[in-house]
Image: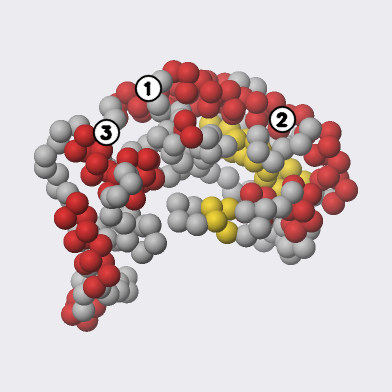
Amino acid sequence: MEIILFLWHKEPARENFMKQSIITAFLGRTQDRFSEYQEPTSLEERLDLVVKIPGVDGVEIVYPYETEEAGVTKKMFNDRGLNFAAINANIKKETQWVPGALSRSNPDIRQGAIEIIKKAKDYAKAVGAPLVTCCPLSDGYDNLFQVDYPKAWRNMVEAVAEAADYLPEVPLFIEYKINETRVHEKDWRLGDPTWQNDKGKGMIGALNYLAEREMNAFSFITMNVNGDDKNVFPYLKYNGNPSPQEDRMRFDCSKLAQWEIVFEHA
């Protein structure tokens, strides 16, 4: 079994030369929980954009959403002098994978995600790509005790092991991400509060989730400016210094208003 977590490749024959590649998904329409960006493009149009980017000759394409028949895709690459850097197995796009894929308690959902990775490996071998990447961005936890963490971790380990053992000559690279709050957006209900053009659905949905499970109390820290994340604090700005006294004289009214919405909903 071969599982590789990080990739950094330096060309030994050329001093101070690092290979660079780009994932084509970002060269078309993308979206996050707030909005959509850019116009949709075909794979050929995305590859045409890649050749215009200085220093990039490697490409990572997403399976199964932008992969043509293997022979057709290889010709697109060869015609443009591009190399396959990787095939990315997408196991987060479909609705059933929003709360997780490889760590889910439902064995059919887990197996469906594993099969996507295996098929991505088959495709990588067919086109000559050296490896498969996978970003299980919906797996994990969001600091709320909504899952059996030990069981979810065992599911994750077993699923990744099965995917990695398949076609071992094509290594599997896993992208790490500590949490994903959007799993609770589905728990937001029509009429629930939001702020700043529909932001906050994940937070409000998390409170709904707890309430539906008859939890009547919860606690959390609204300021960890000196903690691990350094991303929750009520002040106007944070300049990176420990306890910046000059920054703690002014409160961010927008943040305070958002917290008030959360407290009132709870």
Q: Which residue is mark 2?
A: 123
* Residue 92: image location, x then y, percent: 51, 37
Q: Secondary structure at mark 2?
A: helix
Q: Say whether disc 3 or disc 2 marks the residue closer to the N-terminus.
A: 2
Amino acid carrying label 3: it is Gln
Q: Say which quadrant the N terminus sits in.
A: top right
- Residue 45's place in the image compared with 217, above or below, is below
Q: Which mark is residue 105?
A: 1
Classify residue 228 by image quadrant: bottom left
* Residue 63: image location, x then y, percent: 65, 36
Q: Is residue 112 visible?
A: yes
Amino acid carrying label 2: it is Tyr
Left or right of residue 208, residue 61 in this image:
right
Report the residue at 41% width, 20% height from top: 106
Per the model, the C-alpha gap separating discs 2 and 1 is 28 Å
Q: Which residue is mark 3?
A: 146
Residues 96 and 265: in front is 265
* Residue 2: image location, x then y, percent: 56, 28
Q: Secondary structure at mark 1?
A: loop
- Residue 116's place in the image compared with 19, above or below, is above
